[in-house]
Amino acid sequence: MVTLDTIVAFTKRRGFVFPTSEVYGGLANSYDYGPYGAELMKNIKDLWWQTFVRERADMVGIDSQIIQHPMTWVASGHVGSFSDPLVEDKKTHKRYRADHLIEAWAKKNTKEVSVDDMKVTDMAEYININKVKSPDGNELTEPKPFSLLFETELGTVAGEKSKAYLRGETAQGIFANFKQILDSCRVKLPFGVGQFGKSFRNEITQGQFVFRTFEFEQAEIEYFFDPEKSDWAGLMEDWKTQMMSFVIDKIGIKTDNLRWRRHTDKERSFYSKDTFDLDYHFPFGWKELWGVAYRTDYDLTAHMKHSGKSLEYVDSQSGKKFVPHVIEPAVGVNRLFLMTLVDAYTEETLADGKTRVVLRLKPNLAPVKVAVFPLQKDPALREIAERIYTTLSKHMVTEFDDAGNIGKMYRRQDEIGTPICITVDYDSVQSQTVTLRDRDTMKQERIKITDLLTYLGQRLML
């Protein structure tokens, strides 16, 4: 498998991901998405939204605020229990996650350990007994809970401030809006609410690229149902099937790099009756990509208690009033992005011994769908190429390049994942045909310029 260092260097060189504020030396756990990265992220998000919201009659979508009423996070339990186990190097004062240091120590010493089942006190005992050190070889402080919520202040009146939080997940915006969705959309159980949005976590761990960052994008669904009419275990299995199908069939991920992992009783969140993670084999090991949990009626009940407002559902036929239960499939879009890049990145040796880097993305995900080149810097060829570019760019993301070296232009487009390249040569002037070159096979064919739009729409499934 490709190394993380290779992916990091590739994404920066080809304009997918840049270190945030690099001009000032960067910022830990923070990255910006460059021109091609922004397009790829948008394509992944559009595919998710189309699949799970627009194509389903039992789904609606919302877009809630990043900063919500602070009681939202008290009710959800984030203020009191949303934390990671923190240890500090006594000499350098660098901070680390205790569970990650234990995992690294166990792997180095070929020991079996399950940190998922450990409480903070268990980690403290393990570190003490096994004399686990920091990466710099120094002693560690006792593990303690470290809040992942970012605090901020709202100044509504001059000189007065009130505490607020940057949201740790988008789900609470769905729960807080549950009653308004019922009143405005005439939805009936079972139904789901989907949402994209930025979330923020004061992460301790560094060094896993866009997998774990302070600011990240989430795609979450809360699927509400009547527990007396719908079998939660059946709904859970149905969502697991849909999640796996999306990753394999829609994004094109290799099945060998995917697995399901069920949370243990100790690991599972206190509000969840059952939780599964869809793991992907990243360059740094098997890690959670997408989670699905049965959250029962915990969230709606908690918000009812703290707000004093009813969030009950009334069955229109029986008149029964109750608090719905919920299944939650939640994924970090940044993790989908990283998985997609890692799985698509390919290095192959050509007949001349040179290495060709190819990003084998599905055409609908590719940042650029078509690239148009004039073979030479000739005004006649450029005029035709620009006319083709103008026509195609109205229908798909198209790139124009006239660097003059056709081999280098092909290689660059292979690396950013462009499925089709179009070359305008001197035959094009007379025959009004162009050469189409396929990214994956490198095979070429000629086609009439007037047929391009129809042909590309079929080839690229646009």
Image (cartoon, rainbow, N blue to C red):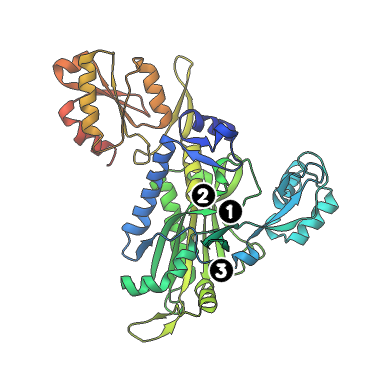
Residue depicted at 23% across the width and 24% down the height = 386
Instruction: Give the distance between the C-alpha atoms of the residues marked 1 and 2, in whole angstroms.
Output: 8 Å
- Rounded to the nearest angstrom, the CA distance separating label 2 from label 3 is 20 Å
Does residue 3 appear anywhere in the picture? no
For the residue marked with disc 1, what is the amino acid?
Answer: Arg
* Residue for badge 2: 216
Residue at mark 3 to residue at mark 1: CA–CA distance = 15 Å
Q: Residue drawn 81% across and 46% down?
A: 90
Q: Is residue 456 left or right of residue 112?
A: left
Contact? badges 2 and 3 (CB < 8 Å) = no
Q: Secondary structure under badge 1?
A: loop
Circles 1 and 2: CB atoms closer than 8 Å: yes
- Report the disc number at residue 76: 3
Q: In which quarter of the image is the N terminus?
A: top right
Disc 1: which residue: 201
Q: Earlier in the sequence, mark 3 or mark 1?
A: 3
User: Amino acid under label 3?
Assistant: Ser
x and y percent of residue 421 in the render?
31, 26
Q: As rendered, which of 178 and 250 lies closer to the eye?
A: 178
Q: Is mark 3 on a helix, strand or loop?
A: helix
Q: Earlier in the sequence, mark 1 or mark 2?
A: 1
Residue 316, horizontal then vertical, whole percent: 33, 82
